Image (cartoon, grey):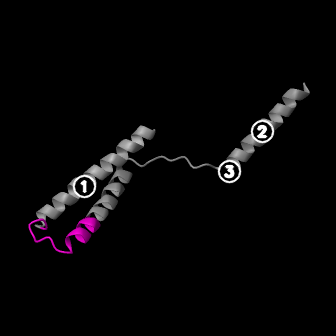
Amino acid sequence: MKSKIDFRQASIYVLSGLLSSFLLGEAGFYRGSLDWTFFPVCFFVGLGMLKFVTEVFNLISPVQAKQINLKELENKAIVAEAFNQSKSQH
């Protein structure tokens, strides 16, 4: 499961980088002069593309993270304790 998540994250980052570079290249942004707007524009385009690609991945195959239910754990502990007590009484 851990390797599946790592592969998913790596795929998201690589795809985001490629798509944001493609988008900026098609817009002709790289041909302009290297002024103060270059890095903020690249950062925010990359951030937006990361959010977009992550949402696309979540639509295609959502991560099934199991939430820990404290009430369920407490109920299991009570049942286990009662079972152990009944076992020791016999």
Among all residues in the image, which is located at the extreme left? 31
Give how far across and how far down residue 36 sits, in percent. Answer: 20, 75
Amino acid type at circle 3 is Leu
How many numbered marks are there? 3
Classify residue 23 as left or right of residue 49: left
Query: Nearer the N terminus, badge 3 or badge 2?
Result: 3
The magenta stretch is 29-45
Give how far across and how far down residue 6 sits, in percent. Answer: 39, 43
For image coordinates 36% across by 57% down, the residue present is 55
Give how far across and how far down residue 87 sits, in percent. Answer: 85, 27
Give how far across and how far down residue 86 sits, in percent. Answer: 86, 31
Residue corresponding to mark 2:
79
Instruction: Tell me if residue 39 comes above or below residue 55 in the rendering.
Output: below
Q: Mark 3 and mark 1: span between their CA atoms?
A: 40 Å
Query: Nearer the N terminus, badge 3 or badge 1?
Result: 1
The verdict on residue 46 being magenta is no
* Front label number (2 vs 1): 1
Amino acid type at circle 2 is Val
Return the residue nearer the eye: 44 or 58.
44
Amino acid type at circle 1 is Gly
Asked if marks 3 and 1 touch (Cβ < 8 Å), the reply is no
Residue corresponding to mark 1:
17
Image quadrant where residue 20 sits:
bottom left
Which type of secondary structure does the marked residue at label 3 adopt?
helix
**Label 3: how many Cα within 10 Å (few below 14, some 14–19, many 20+):** few
